[in-house]
Image: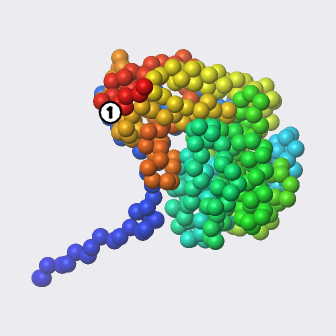
Amino acid sequence: MPAQKTAPSPALSARGRGMPASPIRKLAPSAERALARGMRIFKLNIGQPDVATAAPFIAAYRGFEPDVIGYAPSDGFKSYREAIVRYYGSFDVEIGTDDLVVTTGGSEALMMAFAACCDPGDDVLLFEPCYPNYIGFATWLGVKTSFVTTTREQGYHLPDRATIEARIGPRTRAMVVCNPGNPTGTVHTRDEIEMLADIARSRGIFLISDEVYRELVFGDAEAVPVLSLPGMDQHAIQVDSTSKRYSACGARIGWVTTRNADLRAAMLKMGQARLSAPTVGQLGGEAAIGLPDDYRRSVVAEYKGRRDVLVKRLEAMPGVELAAPDGAFYIMVELPVDDTNEFCAWLLEEHDHGGDTVMLAPGEGFYGTPGLGTNEARIAYVLDSEDLDHAMDVLESGLAHYPGRKETS
């Protein structure tokens, strides 16, 4: 019999080839090898807090006793949506239960928002450095990205209106702002958010506001909810999540809110296509949402203490530059190295500080503009102050011994 011809392997899609690796997770193989060598790793690369998950959240899981874990409604349990409405009412944001869709984490909320606003080939405007999954979600959906750069020297606050509007093109459909910011910890001022809202209204585009860190604000800073601004009913999309507020990242519960009825209807149909958000996770979210202000204040105080330890240590390290954050639990730092991709890998592959090393997220992946972020890294202060202080010992040792260190004056 003649030899059977082998067909060529099928080709990946353009979006499959173009999906960016996460700077937060791409060094996981190096971390696994370090663990296999017996190293202890202080993981400051990912926003996974060590703060205990809110007790009512855990109690809801433990108290769940039905024989069958059934589907939830596609827009979420009504009792949970009613609880969210009350939660927003506590800081004077009026919404109804039919203005939101409960999602599988804030990630799905962002995906739904991008998909409902944009067709393939449309554009979203991002403020860099930004949460890298914004770029990943856009790529996944065939949506293009444009960038406005913010700088450490300006505390990663927004530039003037003319600079922003210059980046809005004929196919720009939405702007995305994270407030407080990931990866910078910047809390944008009311004037900044009102400027973005006015641009959205005047240019006829959407403003997607990622507010999952809204309550993690230090000092006198104020994170202004986009839904609190007048005239934004048709333009504003607000993304939220239980992950950071209640230290419940693995529950995968979030929601997306808009008063634009057509937009909400489109996102609900997307929710129907994926059936429902996790049933038990919603019960946990509903149980936790009524926690008293004392809980929030204690969590904020904990992160502020960690922030203060981190900033003090980093400011004392020669060649390290930073802007102290006002919220969330992240900081972007400029390090005296040629390439933080290589430095962060070296920390895991070669550095040994008494059996310890540290894991950071290289900064390049938080930018869309080529060449930016190559000497920056994001640090997530998700460990308690004692561990964080020791992790800075490890980082300082790493900077002192790294062969690619840049000399500073």
The quadrant in which residue 244 appears is top right
* Position in image of residue 145 (x %, y %): 56, 61
Q: Nearer the viewer, residue 128 or 90?
A: 128
* Residue 355 visible from this viewpoint: yes
Residue at far bottom of view: 2
For mark 1, does the 10 Å Cα neighbourhood hold few (<14), some (14 to 19), or many (20 or more) residues? some
Helix, strand or loop at label 1? It is: loop
* Position in image of residue 195 (x %, y %): 76, 52
- Image quadrant holding the N terminus, namely bottom left
Residue in the image at 37% along x and 31% along y:
406
* Position in image of residue 366 (x %, y %): 51, 47
Residue in the image at 51% along x and 61% along y:
139
* Position in image of residue 5 (x %, y %): 20, 78
Left of 345 or right of it: where is 368?
Answer: right
Residue in the image at 69% along x and 39% along y:
187
Q: Which residue is mark 1?
A: 404
